[in-house]
Image: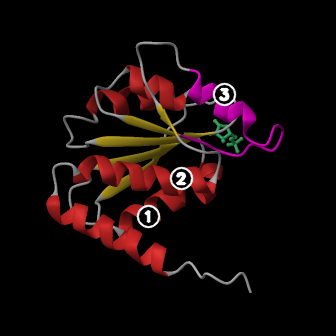
Amino acid sequence: MTDQPIVGIIMGSRSDWETMRHAAETLAALGVPHETKVVSAHRTPERLYDYAKSAKDRGLKVVIAGAGGAAHLPGMCASMTPLPVLGVPVESKALSGMDSLLSIVQMPGGIPVGTLAIGKAGAINAGLLAAAILATHDEALAERLADWRAKQTQSVDEAPE
Ligand code: RP5
């Protein structure tokens, strides 16, 4: 998107994109300008430091961070920015994402990460939750979000077959 990004989507590896693209697609469908970047807490710690420390001053309002395994990215990011950070546990091969979920959700009191579900559902919901946060100060976005939800409701058939 060409507009100034207001949501940052970061992920620990390019391998997370298959999951995290659902957050990006959800934000795109709602017309929310966003950026995407690979930032690893373990492999690129200085990139993480620079990203988190500059996020607010660059105009971001919310950060969505997805990671798998020993998923320190959302918590470390949250520790270095005042912005709300939403964490998406990526489904890992070894433990089906339980490792990612517990790494992200069990933050010690004092540094919150809003943790979503494992995998695609979590990525979609992170996009929707970021939009809902932004919509508290953006009436046009609130209307687009309400339309999105109304369309979802209309798309649910009553008959199972
Ligand atoms: C984490 O390790 C990433 O978030 C990813 O989910 C996981 C595996 O990364 P790759 O080995 O596929 O690059 O840091």
Q: CA distance from mark 1 to mark 2?
A: 9 Å
- Residue interval drawn in magenta: 88-106
Q: Which residue is mark 1?
A: 26
Question: Could you tell me residue 93's position as x and y percent?
Answer: 81, 44
Kind of residue at disc 2: Ala
Q: Check whether the beta carbons of the residues at disc 1 and disc 2 lie within 8 A of each other.
A: yes
Q: Secondary structure at mark 2?
A: helix
Verify CB contact (< 8 Å) between mark 3 and mark 2: no
| Residue occupying the point 19% across, 35% down | 57
Q: Is residue 112 above or below residue 146?
A: above
Across and down, in percent, residue 69 comes to 70, 33
Q: Residues within 10 Å of mark 2 (few under 14, many from 20)?
A: many
Above or below residue 148? Residue 66 is above
Residue 142 lies, in percent from the top left, at 24, 61
> Going by the image, does 80 lie left or right of 105?
left
Q: Locate ligand 1 by image quadrant.
A: top right
Residue 45 vs residue 91: left or right? Answer: left
Lower sequence index among marks 3 and 2: 3
* Position of the C terminus by quadrant: bottom right
The Cα atoms of the two marked residues, 1 and 3, are separated by 25 Å
Name the mark on residue 123.
Answer: 2
Q: Check disc 1 and report its element: helix, strand or loop.
A: helix
Which quadrant of the structure image shows residue 95? top right
* Residue tagged 3: 102
Q: Amino acid at mark 1?
A: Thr
- Of labels 1 and 2, earlier in sequence is 1
Disc ID at residue 59: none
Helix, strand or loop at disc 3?
helix
